[in-house]
Image (tube, rainbow, N blue to C red):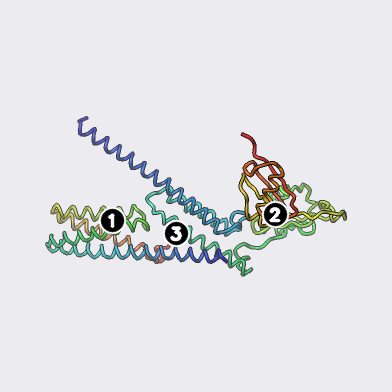
Amino acid sequence: MYRLYGALAVFGIALCIITTGFIIDTRTADKVIRELDSSYELAKNGDIEGAKRKIEAAKSEWDNNMETMLLFMSHGRLDQIESSINTAYNYIKSNEISMFIAECASARLMTGHFIDVEYPYLNNIF
Amino acid sequence: MRKGEAEYIYSKFYGGVRFCRRLMIISAIRTVLLYVIIICAVRMMGKRQISEMQTSELVITLLMSNIASIPMQDTDQSMLSGILPIMILLVCEILISYLMLKRSKIRRLICGKPVIVIDNGQIDQQAMIQLRISTEDLFEQLRQKDIFDINEVAFAIIETNGKLSVMKKAENETLTVSDMELPFEEKYLQTTVISDGELADASLKYCGLNKENIYNIIKKEKLKLNDIFIMTIDKNGKYNIIRKEKK
């Protein structure tokens, strides 16, 4: 009977880990996606300073949560997104707007995909 | 090669070596951590896991070993990607084993049922075909039970874990004390009370003895606790001492 209680406790812990990881990842990704979208739109409309602020916010959000996300996700995937966001940030710092827009779109796609594969949909399971 | 180039190449190489060393340290630490986690998981699953395995237990054991090796070798994967599946498997195994205990139908579904392959001295060929066991397999298992003549066997059953249980014919059974109607002394379990100089309190309790009793015996034998490699004793007070070898 003790083993059964132990198993239920382990299950509870596993459920907490899964839920925590899911919440942190989706929340961070959603925020980053919003900032990237805003940055992209502002850059397209010519508001470079606004775009810079937004990409900085996206970078900051990602950097703040990266350490925690590393506990739950593959490091390779996170590194790719971090690399893309940093590249976009560097492009806008050096006023390469067209490159920035392209990189922003790429980062947004990767971040979106990063979250899509977390949901327990059938196509993700199989 | 220019001076700057050589320094650049050296810094890249040295940085790469440091990076690899870091990976190896991480791999080593993860190996130790996962080793501890697997031991805890196997302990939680209980003695069934360590002894004869049923189908579900074999599956769990194989899966756990494969899952644990992934974050050990691939430091790109988070450790939780190894630990979480192990936890889920542990829960599944304990739940399934508990359900099998409570419901015989579930046990039959997962483990199957024992099959009689030799019934009253006759080999059940249909049963052997059903189990996909060849005559060589059957005879090999009989030989492992020290049976070299199939005519000695009354019943043979293939258990759910694949092992063969055998009941010999009465005329081929080993004689027992009660068969010969001889008087006999009741035997008790000899438990290890000292192992490598350390007293085992649980064993003392089982024998209904205390430390004083053991120390008196040791004193009678003119020994010290640290001189003893193994000491076993039963409820009758019959003991056995093996001394440590002198270095």
Look at label 2 and name its amino acid.
Leu
Q: Is residue B132 visible?
A: no
Point out which mark residue B84 bears.
3
Vertical position of residue B227 compared to residue B208: above or below: above
The reply to whether the C-beta atoms of the residues labelled 1 and 3 are less than 8 Å apart is: no
Rounded to the nearest whole Å, what is the CA distance between mark 1 and mark 3?
24 Å
Query: Which residue was labeled with disc 2?
Result: B164
Q: Secondary structure at mark 2?
A: strand
Question: Do the residues at discs 3 and 2 belong to one chain?
Answer: yes
Q: Is residue B236 left or right of residue B70?
A: right
| Quadrant location, the N terminus of chain B | top left
Marked residue nearer the N-terminal end (3 or 2): 3
**Front in this rendered view, residue A26 or B152:** A26
Question: Which residue shows up at 48% across the image and 60% down it?
Answer: B87
Query: Which residue was labeled with disc 1?
Result: A81
Rounded to the nearest whole Å, what is the CA distance between mark 3 and mark 2?
37 Å
